[in-house]
Image (tube, rainbow, N blue to C red):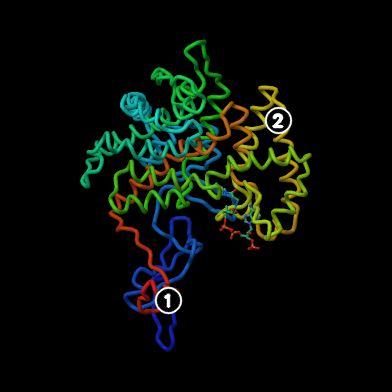
Amino acid sequence: MNSAKLKIDDKEFELPVIEGSEGEKAIDISRLRNDTGYITSDTGYKSTGSTRSAITFLDGENGILRYRGYPIEQLAEKSTFLEVAYLLIYGELPTSKELEDFTSGISRHTLIHEDMKKFYEGYPAKAHPMGILASMISALSTFYPDAQKADLTPDEVDVTVKRLIAKSATIAAWSFKKSQGHPIMYPQNRLSYCANFLHMMFALPTEEYEVNETVEKALDTLLILHADHEQNCSASTVRMAGSSHASLYAAISSGVCALWGPLHGGANQEVIEMLEQIRQNGGDVKKMVEKAKDKKSGFRLMGFGHRVYKNFDPRAKIIKKACDDVLEEFGIDDPLLDIAKSLEEVAVSDDYFLERKLYPNVDFYSGILYRAIGIPTEMFTVMFALGRLPGWIAQWKEMRDNNEPISRPRQLYVGHTERDYVSLDKR
Ligand code: CMC
């Protein structure tokens, strides 16, 4: 029986040590406050496991990422986004019948209520598509109020899952149409998930639009790579919001908002803006690296560093290769790719980055690939959200299936001690 000993003053407490299926160890402190009166302090949860999860395994020291045990490299090469979505949500790879039912179920839910179309009229033309995505997903809960029930049956959960995956793509593509001032394109259920999304994004009523297979495949791979990443900021947000028994729509909408920030999914947009700035300033990557090292500048190299990966991000490796392939096939010469490669070269051999184990993360090259397949910069984080959706759903479902209690961290209060109110005329 493994345990850890904690000594506070002259008293000793025994804390159970639990072990994960990959040999990771954790000290179970769930009874700590009851037994000792103490809490632990760990701002940013750098050493805190918030749950026990069977969805994704991540070994940051060795650059390993597996969904339900399957290596990301194999899934990216051999699987499809909807198959991976099924795997994450239901725990096993689907049989062909299960995959067919899941895929056709999603196709049947791609339309959004015609009344929701009117919401688009109210958003300003420059509305960020992440703001639209979060608010429209939250609004879905008003059209499906039954999803709020505490005792949802598995079938009721399944239909919400399908609605979310199907409708989010429509909502996202329509937010792009809104920004362009173009008419929306209705979903085409005969097309694959990615082909339908590309059609809704880029087709116009005035001309024929054929979905390019390379683009469709590249998009599918990108979505697979983003599909889950264990207890990151947005997944934890989804679990936390869901732990109050808010509906799946509400929990996912919270996750979209959490993903939006530049330190999380919003980094992919920031990377391109940073590379563009370097290009406009004559391509001096060394200057940018020096700026990132200077704490006073408040600037960070976007697309570099990760809370968990301290060696390399396996997703970045796959994206870099996909990026080279797509650019070569389309004969695109993107100057930002050359800048990105020189920036990586300078940064990864710099002592500051080496000492802190800062390597390119998934967002470093994903933007260049999105650009190559025609996705506009403002939509990058939305693409990340579409990819992450199955992961968020799986995290929410696992939390519910395990009957986890409401998430409610404690704090160390460091404010004023009690003091008397002072009336306005005496201040
Ligand atoms: N550029 C320059 N310095 C950095 C960077 C960076 N991108 N990232 C971390 N550092 C430094 C940081 O200043 C600190 O230095 P010191 O020890 O001297 O104080 C040290 O490295 C450790 O950083 P941290 O902020 O304590 O690490 P964290 O685990 O809290 O943050 C991170 C992880 C991803 C937020 C951070 O690396 C970062 O801000 N990166 C840039 C934004 C980015 O690319 N985000 C996308 C993450 S991957 C997609 C996703 O899953 O969301």
Residue lying at the far top in this picture: please name it: 207
Q: Which residue is mark 2?
A: 334
Q: Is residue 89 left or right of residue 75?
A: left
Quarter assignment of residue 212: top right
* Crowd around label 2: few <14 · some 14–19 · many ≥20 (10 Å): few
Q: Which residue is mark 1?
A: 416
Q: Quadrant of ligand 1?
A: bottom right
* Crowd around label 1: few <14 · some 14–19 · many ≥20 (10 Å): few
Tag 2 and tag 1, C-beta contact below 8 Å: no
Please state which of residues 229 and 171 is positioned toward the viewer in this rendering.
171
Element assignment for label 2: loop
Image quarter where the N terminus lies is bottom left
Q: Is residue 195 left or right of residue 218?
A: left
Q: In the displayed structure, would residue 154 be above or below residue 38?
A: above
The earlier-in-sequence mark between 2 and 1 is: 2
Please state which of residues 420 and 399 is positioned toward the viewer in this rendering.
420
Looking at the picture, which amino acid does disc 1 mark?
Answer: His
Image quarter where the C terminus lies is bottom left
Residue under the image location 41 percent in, 51 percent down? 237
Please state which of residues 95 and 142 is positioned toward the viewer in this rendering.
142
How many labels were placed on the picture? 2
Residue under the image location 37 percent in, 37 percent down? 137
Residue under the image location 43 percent in, 83 percent down? 8
User: Which numbered circle lies on residue 186?
Assistant: none
Looking at the picture, which amino acid does disc 2 mark?
Answer: Asp
Residue 390: x percent and y percent? 41, 39
Residue 208: x percent and y percent? 51, 10
Please state which of residues 4 and 233 is positioned toward the viewer in this rendering.
233
Mark nearest the camera among 2 and 1 is: 1
Quarter assignment of residue 358: bottom right
Q: In the displayed structure, would residue 199 be above or below residue 397?
A: above
